[in-house]
Image (spheres, rainbow, N blue to C red):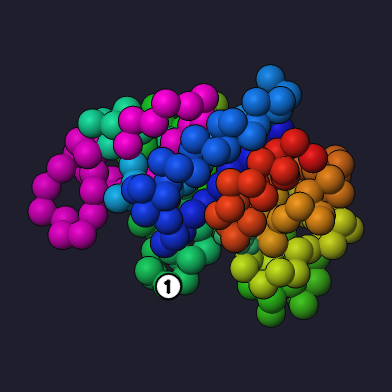
Amino acid sequence: MIFAGNFKTNHTRQSTALYIKELTQKTKAKKEEDRIILFPPLTAIDDYESDFTIGVQNAYHIQNGAYTGEIGLEQLDEFGIKTILIGHSERREHLGESQELLTQKFNFFKEEAFEIIYCIGEPLEVRKKGFEAVMKYLLAQFDGIDIAYDKLIIAYEPIWAIGTGRSATVEEISSTHRALKNVIKETALLYGGSAKLSNIKEILSIAGVDGVLVGSASLDADGFSKMVLA
Ligand code: PEP
């Protein structure tokens, strides 16, 4: 199983270092095949001593150049970063990242052989329209994306479940993952949206769920370690 933690705009360099130490200690008993990927904020990217994969929540699709406020490949290379999150709904919504821009990012980092966690998810008004509308919406988020890329992981994150405390139901996750797996085949598929200690076992037992992308519940190392061990 894959346990990915997205810190968003939380934690500092100092608290991330302490977090990684604590999580390392507390996940010693995890199954060998289980994998932990952490996405700290950019200021906390460093060469940490741990078995976890450290990825970035965002980067610009450029080696270097005049892109004020962004970082490019040169800055990621300095820390050996080879994993990136692309398409998170918060970047699509709040930062206005279009499908066209996401495609450019995807293609650039694919060319650079990055592991890409590509997020898709529907808003509540689409979910309310029914399953067909949901699938149509989700599949449109694959436009321009090479879903056969061998270093790709997809995260299905219904927007209405992100940060709300209300996860999708087992039936919603199950039917959506089944339909997505028909399209993406062997590509790993994570669920994201209010995954936490109280629902992690149930979520991970659903067919077609290969792990979780966790926001709020990943912020505390002790709590996240319990999810990994659950
Ligand atoms: C996320 O933002 O990717 C996420 C899943 O957040 P949360 O776990 O807080 O719903």
Residue, disc 1: 94
In the image, residue 141 lies at what x, y percent?
Answer: 55, 56
Name which residue type carries label 1: His
In the image, residue 90 lies at what x, y percent?
Answer: 48, 66
What residue is shown at x 48% (from left), y 27% (from top)? 50
In this view, 214 is above or below 161: above
- Residue 126 is drawn in which quadrant? bottom right
Q: Is the magenta stretch mostly helix, strand or loop?
A: loop
Which quadrant: the N terminus? top right
Q: Give 148 or 159, whichever is nearer the viewer.
A: 159
In this rendering, position of residue 162 left or right of residue 114:
right
In the image, residue 183 lies at what x, y percent?
Answer: 70, 42
What residue is shown at x 60% (from left), y 60% (from top)? 216
The stretch of residues the image draws in magenta is 46-75
What residue is shown at x 71% (from left), y 69% (from top)? 165
In this view, 104 is above or below 79: below
Q: Is mark 1 on a helix, strand or loop?
A: loop
- Residue 28 is drawn in which quadrant? top right
Work out whether residue 8 can be spotted.
yes
